[in-house]
Image (cartoon, rainbow, N blue to C red):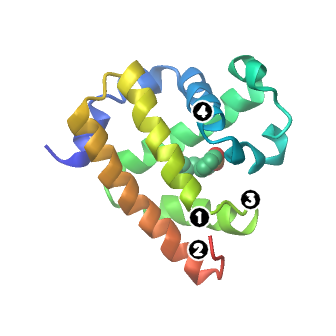
Amino acid sequence: MADYDLILKHWGPVEADYSAHGNLVLTRLFHEYPDTQKLFPKFAGIAKGDMAGNAALSAHGATVLKKLGELLKARGNHGAILKPLANSHATKHKIPINNFRLISEVIGKVMGEKAGLDAAGQQALRSVMAAIIADIEADYKELGFAG
Ligand code: CUP
């Protein structure tokens, strides 16, 4: 089965509650990689213990997972979806590229626990995210953002 399908097979539970899963992803990202919490100023002041109930965190987490859903469903034809995202993350949010690798790992773990993403699915997610991140990196270079 193609990588995209191996992941999309487990997308149902994520899609059924983007906010809850999005909150889990960002809460875990900030716990496991504390530096990532400083990337978005509106999240920098949230105490570790308050993350699970934080509405702004749930909202951004939902945005991230919805975008990922669109990217997955585009099955590689994601240029038009990815470009504005890469642009805003380079010029507005200034998010270094490695953070996309960190959030990808965390998404894999959360999907493993909450959506039954198995070992093959985790590997598929790694390859798909590597391709997406390579495209973001190419856009970053074009824009002159070192990332
Ligand atoms: O949109 C947005 O916001 C982004 C999303 C994505 C994901 C994955 C891939 C691509 C894109 N984001 Cu936000 C991201 C990030 C965050 O939030 C944090 C950290 C890192 C990254």
Lower sequence index among marks 1 and 2: 1
- Residue 77 versus residue 14: which sits nearer the camera? 14
Residue occupied by mark 1: 86
Q: Above or below — where is 46 with respect to 141? A: above
Residue pictured at 53% horizontal, 44% vertical: 103
At label 3, counting other C-alpha atoms closer than 10 Å, the crowd grade (few under 14, some 14-19, many 20 or more) is: few
The disc label shown at residue 62, or none:
4
Residue 54 visible (yes or no): no
Whole-percent x and y of residue 62?
60, 33
- CA–CA distance between discs 4 and 2? 24 Å
| Callout 4: SS | helix
Tell me whether the residue at label 1 lies in contact with that at label 4, contact meaning CB atoms closer than 8 angstroms.
no
- Image quadrant containing the C terminus: bottom right
**Mark on residue 140?**
2
Asked if ligand 1 lies within 8 A of label 1, the reply is yes
Q: Which mark is residue 56?
A: none
Q: Residue at x 62, y 27 (%)?
A: 23
Image quarter for residue 135?
Answer: bottom left
Local crowd size for mark 4, using a 10 Å CA cut-off: few (<14), some (14–19), many (≥20): many
